Structure formats: structure tokens, C-alpha cells
Amino acid sequence: MSLELRLTMLKVQSPRGLPSVLLLACALAAATAHAQSYPTRTVRILVPASPGGGSDLQARLLAKRFADSMGQNFVVDNRPGASGVIGAELVARAPADGYTLMVATAQIPVNLLLLKKAPFDMVRDLAPVSQLSFAPQFLMVHPSVPAKSLPELVALAKKSPGKLNAGSGGNGSANHLAIEMLKLAANISVTHVPYRSGGPSIAALVSGETDFSFSGAVTALPQIRSGKVRALAVTSTKRTSVMPDLPTIASFYPGYDSANWYAMFVPAATPAAIISKLHTETVTALKTPEIRDFMVGEGADVVGGTPAELGAYLKREIERYSGIIKSARIKGD
């Protein structure tokens, strides 16, 4: 039924209601027209991290694709600080007009949970656009550790509780959560050794300062392929294409899942029509060989889900992270 016919029927049925109906129709028409013409100026893609990381690289690839497909400049704005919370808060407080986007990682909701008083609510103050990708971590041991498989590592830990050292990029980091999840799943006791970031944590593993650690593909694969560390398992629920012979931790401990994810968000009140357009453009971009091949090379899998799927996933992840943090009594640095 056309809009004109609906208005005619409403006029016959309720003459006094016609002005409000016309106002609603005008508002809907204006919103649709705005979305169709969007964007009309430069769009900022805020990355709450330093240049060079996974979220930054993915944002830059999308910015180039969006500029080509939508005919406007898309600029990446790096705003590191407070483990991503500062930059994410800027997006949460930005005008909800479609001209401020954010590429975020799983670390942001974790960091918000670790704060005594979070400056914003990720579910309430941000609107989901699309999950871009997810990337597993690799469980690695130093070559001196006499464990050639995950069951052997668990057996070592149970034989000498607290003796094995597990390095991470800091309290509450993705690899710290992976350690705590393994401790809970396998019922083992190991000593957590937090470092200032992932780089020093990997360096400690390579030198033998720590016995095992978790890390993403970008930092893990060069060390694994050079033989400086030995990979035992991957943290995602499915095997990774970059090392298809490596088993998942979930194959030994069902339900284990500690993959990092990357996703796009906008301020909460952004018009639905603009979110829909951004989602369509994002999914199209993720299908291009340039972006898909980059993701695969980084050990990540492309997702491209709907806003509703990302919103539901975020809520589940926050609930899961909250449980892990409480069970392991993790405190922020």
C-alpha cells in the first residue's frame, strides 16, 4: 500500500488526526532523504588505539573503501588512552548524525567492567553497525617446557600447582582473560605474570622468562614459525585457517572461547536509516578481495553481521566477561 493511499484512508477515518499523520510522514520522508544523501561531508572513523594495531588497520581499509563507494572523505582518528575507554567515550558523547564512527575491540567492554565507575554504558550509549571480524589467540609454550599438547601442559600444571608462569599483556588484557579461562576450565593453578603490553609478554616467553602465554596471530605467528615458541592450541571454537592442524582448546574443554573481535559502532541515537546504509557499505567492503585477504593474512575471520546480531553478541560477551572477571577476581591496573 502506498504512502498516499494510507494518508487518504486516515483522512477519511480520522480528520482531526491528519496534521499529526502528515508530520510523521514528512519526518519519515526527511529521514529517508537524509540517509540517501549521506554523507555530505567528511566522516571520522575513531580508533581508540594507537596506529598499527588490528583495529587501526581494519579502519583504514574500510575508510578507503567507503571513500570510493560513497564519494566523501573518511578519515581515521586515533585516540589511544585508558585502554580504549577515552576514545570510546568520545564516540558515545559525539553528535548522533553519522559523522563519527568507531572501530572497537573486545578489550573496551572488558576495561569498562574493570573500572569502579564506568564513564559510559556501551550498550546504552553506542549503537551497533556490524561485527567486522574475530581473531583467535594462540596458546604457546617456551621450547624448554616439556609439553607437546594441551593435555600435557595441564598435566604439568596439576603436578606442580603454581609452578608454571603464564605471561600476559596486563591485568584484564585479552590474553590474561584467556589464562584465567583456561585455569577455570582445566582446574589448574598457575602464576600469572602481567607485563605492560603484549610485546613485552611475548619477549618474556621467547626468552624463557615465562612458560606459556596467549597472543594473537600478528605477534604469535612469526615466533611460532621461527621455532622460538611452540603452539599447542587456538582459543576460537573453530580451527584457524592459518594453522589448520592446530586443535582448539574447546575440543578439550567444551565452551572455551576467547577470540578477540572487531566491530563498528556509532552514537546511540544515530538514525536507523544511516546505520542501515553504513551496515550495507560495511558488508560490501568486507567481501572485497583486498579486505578479505588482509583479514585472512592476519589470522582473522570476516563476519559482517547485522546490527541486531552485533547488539545481541555484545550483551552476551559483557555477561561472559563479567563472570570471568568475578570468578578470577581480576582487578584493573
Image (spheres, grey):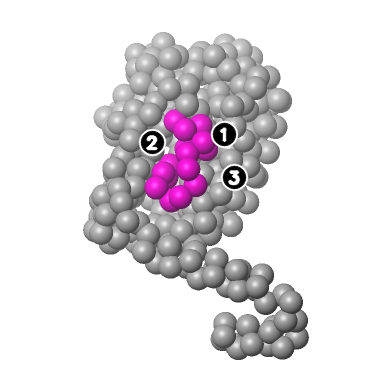
Quadrant of res 184: top right
Quadrant of res 321: top right
Quadrant of res 4: bottom right
Provide the residue span drawn in magenta: 87-102
Which of these two is toward me, 305 or 259? Answer: 305
Residue type at mark 3? Leu
In the displayed structure, 4 sits above or below 42; it is: below
Q: Nearer the viewer, mark 3 or mark 2?
A: 2
Residue type at mark 1? Pro
Residue 47, which numbered label?
A: 2
Q: Is residue 187 left or right of residue 92?
A: right
Q: Nearer the viewer, mark 1 or mark 2?
A: 2
Q: What is the C-alpha distance between the residues marked 1 and 2?
A: 15 Å
Residue position for label 3: 314
Q: Is residue 90 magenta?
A: yes
Q: Is residue 25 left or right of residue 104?
A: right
